[in-house]
Amino acid sequence: MSTVARFHIDHVRFLDPQGEALGPLPDFARDPAQLVPMYRAMYLTRTFDAKAIALQRTGKLGTFASALGQEAIGVGVASAMRAEDALFPSYREHAAQLVRGVRIEESLRYWGGDERGSDFAQARHDFPNCVPIGTQVCHAAGAAYAFKLRGEARAAVCFLGDGGSSKGDFYEGLNFAAVWKAPLLIVVSNNQWAISVPRSAQSATATLAQKAIAAGVEGVQVDGNDLVAVHHVAREALAKARAGGRPTLIEAVTYRLGDHTTADDASRYRDPAVVQEQWSFEPLTRLRNHLVGLGAWGPDKEEALARECTETVNAAVEAYLNTPPPTTAAMFEHLFATLPAALVAQRDEALRFTPRKAGGQPGGDHG
Amino acid sequence: MAEINLVEAVNLALAHELARDEAVVLLGEDIGANGGVFRATVGLQQRFGAGRVVDTPLAETAIVGTAIGMAAMGLRPVAEIQFSGFLYPAIDHLINHAARLRNRTRGRLTCPLVVRTPCGGGIHAPEHHSESPEAMLAHTPGLRVVMPSSPARAYGLLLAAIRDPDPVMFLEPTRMYRLFRQEVADDGEALPLDVCFTLRGGTDLTLVSWGAMLHETQAAADALATEGISAEVIDVATLKPLDLPTILESVARTGRCVIVHEAARTAGLGAEIAAGLAEEGLYSLLAPVQRVTGYDTVMPLSRLETQYLPSVERIVAAARKTLEAS
Ligand SMILES: Cc1ncc(C[n+]2csc(CCOP(=O)(O)OP(=O)(O)O)c2C)c(N)n1
Ligand SMILES: [Mg+2]
C-alpha cells in the first residue's frame, strides 16, 4: 500500500479577537490609508443592516437577510477586487455589494419587492442577489471562462454560505473552474448556520476549505472576522487568478449574529448565550482596536463616522421611500428584448385591471 | 373538535401518519428543531425522533433522490422542499426516477413517495418564493399532483397521499396556510385522490379552480350571487390525474365555464381542462370557455404581485363574458 494523496489546510489569522497582531502583518495592514476605507465600509454595512431591519419591522421593507457579524468577509474580499472583475453574491453579501458601488437605495428596492433594485447604476457586470442557493457558483465559473477565453485580466468572485456548500452546483462549478483553470474565487461564508441547521449537520468534513482538494483547487481557511486575514488571502487569490491562474476556494469562518432573516426567530433553535459569546469575536471591534493601535483611530473619528453613516443611510432610505411605484407594464417590459405579439393582449388586460393606486407599498409582511 | 388552519392540518396529518406507520419518515431542510419555516412539522422531531424526522444538508437533489431510494426499500418518505422555487434541482429525480421506477421495472420496484412543498404567491415573500409549478409537474407521466384548498382537505388528502403506493407531489398554497380555520377531526379518514370537490352548487355557470385561487373564485361566486347569477364552484384538488367527468357533468348543466389559476397561462392546466371540454363537452357549451390566469410573465416581486394574481374583478368579468355570449 502506498499513499497517493495527502493534504493539509491552512488557517489564516493575523489579528486576535482584541485586534492584537499575532505576528508579522502584511504591508497593507499597517497602512491606515488602506485599512480605514475598509473599516468605514464595514461600519456602513452595519448601519444599513440595522436600518433595514427597523424598516422591515415597521412594514416598510420585505424580508431582509442581515450580514451582522460577517462584514469583514464581504468588505475584505470586495476591496481586493477591481472594478472590471465581476461579483456573484448570495443574498447576504451587501457588505461586498456596497464596496462594489451598489447603492443602499438599490438594495432597499430589491428587499422592498421591486426588481429595479437589481438594475445597479454601477457594477454593471455584477450579478444580482442569488436566492436559489449555490447556483451562482456555476454562473461565476462560466464568467471566469469568458474572461479567460478573451484573454482579459479579470476574475469572477462568488459568495455562498456553509449550507450552500452542500449543493451540487457548488461542487460542479468548482470542478468546471478547476478543469478550465478559470480565474475564479469562491468564498464560503461559513457563519455556522443554514437557517436552523448547524454546520456540524451540514458536512462531515473538518473544514469546508478542504472541499477544494477534491476538485484539484487550492483551499484555504481564514478567520472571517479578521479583516486583515480575509483581505490578504483574497488579494493573493485574485492576483493568482488574474495572472492567468487558477481558482481558489476560501472558507471564511464567522458567525451569524442575527436571525437568518427577519422572517426567522433563531431563539427557537439556538442558545442565545452562545450568540452572546460570539459577540466577543465580531469583526468591527477587532479592526477598530488595531486602527487605534496604529494611532489611526480614536473616539472623535468613530463619532464622526457614526454620524456620517447614519446620514448616508437616512438619505438612501429617503430615496427608496420616494421611488415612484413600479408600473404594471414593467412586468412585461423586460421578459424578452421585445414584447412578443402574443403577450400584448395579456399586457393590455393587466393594464385594464390595474387599480389606480397600484404598485403596492414599499415592503410587505414576511416570507 | 379543534378549529385549525391549513398548516396545522398538515402537521396533524403528518403526526397521524408517523404514529400509525413506522415506515413513514420525514426529511427536509429545517424541519426538525425549527419545525419547518412555515411550522408545518413543529413538534414532530421531538415526538418521533431525529431518525424519522430528518434535518438534511442543503440539497434538494439529494432530498428527493435519497427519498426515492428509501421509498423503493420499504419506507414511506415524505420529503419537504422548503419552497417550490427550490424544487427545480430535484426535477431530474422526479421525472427520470420517481415517476417511472414502477414502469421501468414492470412493477418490481415502486416509489411510494410524497414531496410536500409550499407554492404560490400573495404573501410578500422574497424572490423565487412564490412559484406555481403545478403544470410542469402534471405534464410528467407517472406523477400525481395534489393541491388542497382548505384545512379539512389538506388533512384528508395528505393522509391519502402518504398511503398511496405511488409518488405524489403535494403542493400547499402558502397564502392559504393561515387564511382561515375549520374544524378538522383527527380521525385518520383520508379523502379520495383523483376526484374534484364541488364546493357549491350553481346553475348558471361553472367556476373551476384549485389551491389559493379558490379564495378569489368563491368571492367571485358571492359577487355574482348578489346579481342573481348562480355559480357552481369546483375545487379540482387532484390536478393529475384529472377528474374530467365531474367538470363535464357540471358544465352539462350550466353550459358555461371559467377556469381560474394562479400559474402562468400558456400550457397551464386551464388549457388542459378547456381542451377536455372542447373534446367531450362542446355540445353542452353555451359560450366559449374562459381562462383567468397569471400572466406569462415571471412572477413579480412583492410590489407587483397583486397585479399578477387573478383578482375577483377579473373572474367576475370573465363570468359575465360567458353569460353575455348567449
Ligand atoms: C436551493 C435552495 N434551497 C432552499 C432555500 C431556502 N433557504 C434560504 S437560505 C437557506 C439557508 C442557507 O444557508 P447558508 O448557505 O449557510 O447561507 P446563510 O443564509 O447562512 O448565509 C435556505 C435553506 C433556497 N433559498 N434555495
Ligand atoms: Mg450559513
Image: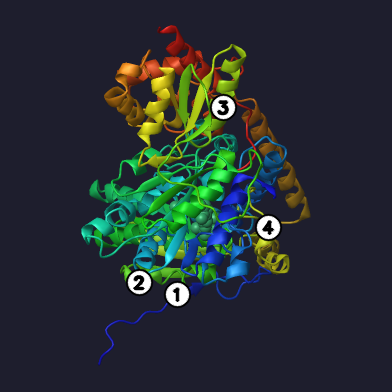
> Which of disc 1 and disc 4 is earlier in sequence?
1
Q: CA distance from mark 4 to mark 2?
A: 40 Å
Of badges 4 and 2, the one in the foreground is 2
Q: CA distance from mark 4 to mark 3?
A: 67 Å
Residue A154 visible from this viewpoint: no
Residue that mark 1 sits on = A205
Disc 4 is attached to a residue of which chain? A
Relative to B205, is A297 on the left or the right?
Answer: right
Q: In the figure, B34 relative to A313: above or below? A: below
Q: Which residue is mark 3?
A: B218
**Which of the two residues, B150 or B84, is positioned nearer the viewer here?**
B150
On the image, the x and y values in percent for residue A32 come to 61, 56
Q: Earlier in the sequence, mark 1 or mark 2?
A: 1
Q: Is residue A267 left or right of residue A114?
A: right
Secondary structure at numbered mark 4 = loop
Residue carrying label 4: A296
**Of the residues shown, which amino acid type is indicated by label 4?**
Ala
Pointer 2 residue Cβ closer than 8 Å to ligand 1: no
